[in-house]
């Protein structure tokens, strides 16, 4: 009788292990540690913040220590890459080149001035502002696109792709070509400047509101004012990605 009971328990235990193993293979999870943020976890698992929140049905950015988050669904998840062509819903197509200084060229004309953003657009823009702040003091690196170092266009690329926008790597001129002027800028819009280290459009940042913007400056990521002595005469205006129209 004891042998039969033991056999039943062993069978149940084995079935449990098999089921657990199958579940873990289908869905990978991560346990939140002290100091973690959604952005940090999403980046480590090659997800955007929106994708991570969607997988876990999160309605806010708040997380707590020891909380378990799904970081890979059973379909393998979907992550975007910077090396693929994309098409916006406004018929603007961009195609990649390998050089970060040559950037991406627009094959159709940009749209007109931006209107009030949709809810999804506003969410991406607010995510971008939120994700940009922790990157303050990141050193400047020519053509840099990681938290180890950014140039101005690489900073914008990293922040917006982390915020959930399927965006290719572009240089400053291509950022300018693939965006439209807005009359009433919101935090998360782009700020453009000309005649800095070269003539014409040469620098860009992310608008924070109240005339302030965050950008990869000559030494590090920092916050500046468009009305400051240096930037005022170089300011050309506020724009919004065509993909967010």
Image (tube, grey):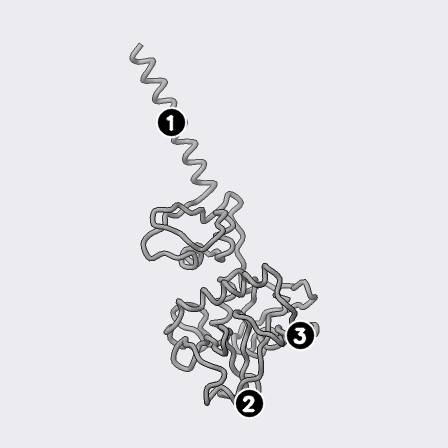
**Alpha carbon separation for disc pair 3 and 2:** 24 Å
Residue projecting furthest to the front: 210
Residue projecting furthest to the left: 2
Graded by Cα atoms within 10 Å as few (under 14), some (14 to 19) or many (20 or more), the crowding at tag 3 reads: some
Residue lying at 51% horizontally and 69% vertically, measured from the top left: 157
Residue projecting furthest to the top: 1
> Mark 1 vs mark 3: which is more N-terminal?
1
The location of residue 194, given as percent across then percent down, is: 54, 86
Residue lying at 39% horizontally and 77% vertically, measured from the top left: 220
As drawn, the label of residue 120 is none
Q: Indicate the quadrant containing the N terminus: top left, top right, bottom left or bottom right.
A: top left
Reading the image, the residue beneath label 3 is: 113
Look at the picture and state if 7 lies above or below 231.
Answer: above
**Alpha carbon separation for disc pair 1 and 3:** 63 Å
Q: Nearer the viewer, mark 3 or mark 2?
A: 3
As drawn, the label of residue 14 is 1
Residue lying at 57% horizontally and 84% vertically, measured from the top left: 236
Reading the image, the residue beneath label 2 is: 199
Q: Nearer the viewer, mark 1 or mark 3?
A: 3
The location of residue 136, given as percent across then percent down, is: 39, 72
**Alpha carbon separation for disc pair 2 and 1:** 70 Å
The reply, left or right, for residue 131 in relation to residue 183 is left
């Amino acid at each position: 009788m004891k042998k039969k009971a033991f056999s039943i328990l062993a069978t149940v235990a084995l079935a449990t292990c098999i089921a657990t193993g199958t579940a873990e293979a289908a869905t990978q999870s991560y346990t939140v540690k002290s100091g973690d943020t959604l952005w940090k976890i999403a980046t480590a698992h090659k997800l955007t913040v929106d994708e991570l929140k969607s997988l876990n049905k999160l309605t806010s950015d708040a997380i707590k220590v020891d909380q378990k988050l799904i970081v890979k669904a059973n379909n393998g998840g979907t992550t975007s890459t910077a090396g693929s062509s994309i098409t916006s819903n406004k018929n603007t197509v961009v195609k990649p080149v390998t050089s970060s200084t040559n950037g991406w060229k627009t094959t159709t004309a940009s749209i007109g001035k931006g209107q009030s953003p949709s809810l999804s657009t506003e969410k991406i823009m607010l995510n971008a502002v939120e994700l940009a702040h922790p990157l303050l003091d990141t050193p400047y690196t020519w053509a840099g696109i990681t938290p180890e170092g950014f140039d101005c266009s690489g900073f914008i690329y990293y922040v917006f792709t982390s915020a959930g926008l399927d965006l290719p790597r572009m240089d400053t001129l291509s950022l300018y070509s693939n965006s439209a002027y807005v009359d009433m800028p919101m935090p998360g819009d782009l700020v453009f400047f000309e005649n800095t280290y070269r003539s014409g459009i040469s620098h860009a940042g992310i608008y924070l509101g109240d005339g302030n913007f965050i950008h990869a400056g000559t030494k590090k990521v920092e916050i500046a004012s468009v009305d400051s002595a240096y930037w005022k005469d170089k300011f050309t205006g506020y724009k919004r990605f065509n993909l967010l129209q």
